[in-house]
Amino acid sequence: MEEKKKEPCEKPGAREVQEALEKQGDHGTSENLEQESEDQEKQAQEAQEASTLELQEVPASGETREARLNRMQRTYLEQVIRIGSIITMYYFEHGKDYVFRGERHNFWEFLYVDKGEIEVVTDDAGHVLKQGMAIFHEPNEFHSFRAAPGRAPNVIVLTFDCDSPAMRAFAGGVLRLEDEERDLLARIVQEGENAFEFPFEYPLKRRERALPGSEQLLRCYLEAFLIRLLRQAPFDEKASPAQLSSPARQKNQEELAAKVIAFMEANVESPVTLDEISRHFHIGKTLLKESFKAQTGTTIMKYWSRIKIGQAKLLIREEACNFTEIAGRLGFGSVHHFSKTFKKASGMSPSEYARSVKARMGTGDGRT
């Protein structure tokens, strides 16, 4: 019998081996990634459970960590100045002859001169406030003001409630605002316009569609403004004499100005000079001029001219003299000089003034 030849087993080629390995490798990689993902999820879950257990862990004291966190000590922020409410808020544009007769009330008032110049009178003193200056009126303090002669003022007035003890530093305070304070004041007015109908009225009327937080920002800006000013107190130590005088000096200036005015009124028909006034009151001319202007807002000679014009008007109304006689009695030198000065001071000639007086009295056209 012939023996069958065994066919040799075919060995897999290199290509087949490579393909088999790649398939096995791909399968292994996918399984590894899935295993790693499962491991990560398990670790995250275990960490969360551990954190929860830690919060719920009850130590010997019987208090959880969460409870300990909840009772951590708080540091409450101190409020040196807190505005309770706003009463009024105004921006006034007054004429050159404006006079506010005065008032007193149980809340604070802040008055700022944005333009022009005003004369302020309080229970204890008088002040001349120029552009950029401000004054505080404490509760129940009488206060009035008027436009300085020929100076039409624009003023900002804020009134508000504040019971903070720190506000006592502002009582009677007169100061000049710097750029930063003026910027804050502008923000206060701007937020006031955002919160309330403008022009401002009393009582303040809220806007129907006010910007969110306008009233809160208004209070924040006002409190920041006051705190910034508070850091400058006492104001009389930081302000120059031209800005704010001490009470003693203020009182002396007021008394001197009043005496000088009384002296000029008593001698209205006599020739009065600055040298004569200086000698009469035993004070140097420079100090005399500065003190008088600080109290009245004008020079001595301009005030003297105003007194003479006032006397001339009185004589015209009384029909005691003609214009030439009036000019001579009041030391004008000539009727032409008198007429020119009169018109400059009153806005009309002596003849026009006389006719206006008679017209008001209903007695005719007056003298020519």
Image (tube, rainbow, N blue to C red):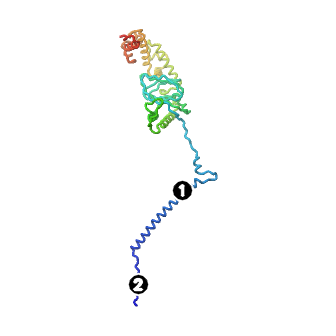
Q: Work out which quarter of the rendered image holds the N terminus and state it.
A: bottom left
Quadrant position of residue 308: top left
221, 56: nearer the viewer: 56
Is residue 336 visible in the rendered image? The answer is yes
Pick whichever of labels 2 and 1 is earlier in the sequence. 2
Residue 68 percent location from the top left of the image: 59, 49
Q: Is residue 225 above or below residue 37?
A: above
Give the residue furthest to the front: 208
Q: Secondary structure at mark 2?
A: loop
229, 203: nearer the viewer: 203
Which of the labelled discs sits on residue 6, or is there none?
2
Give the residue furthest to the right: 60
Q: Is residue 77 above or below residue 363?
A: below
Residue 259 percent location from the top left of the image: 50, 17
Badge 2 density bin: few <14, some 14–19, many ≥20, Cα 10 Å: few
Badge 1 density bin: few <14, some 14–19, many ≥20, Cα 10 Å: few
Q: Residue flagged by tag 2: what amino acid is it?
A: Lys
Q: Residue flagged by tag 1: what amino acid is it?
A: Gln
Q: Secondary structure at mark 1?
A: helix
Which of the labelled discs sits on residue 3, or is there none?
none
Give the residue furthest to the bottom: 1
Q: Work out which quarter of the rendered image holds the C terminus and state it.
A: top left
Residue 231 percent location from the top left of the image: 52, 34
130, 315: nearer the viewer: 315
Q: Residue shown at 55%/57% (left/top)?
A: 49
For the residues bearing labels 2 and 1, Cβ distance under 8 angstroms: no
Residue 74 percent location from the top left of the image: 57, 44
Q: Is residue 104 above or below residue 360?
A: below
> Spatial distance from mark 2 to mark 1, Cα to Cα?
67 Å
Which of the labelled discs sits on residue 48, or is there none?
1
Is residue 249 visible in the rendered image? The answer is no
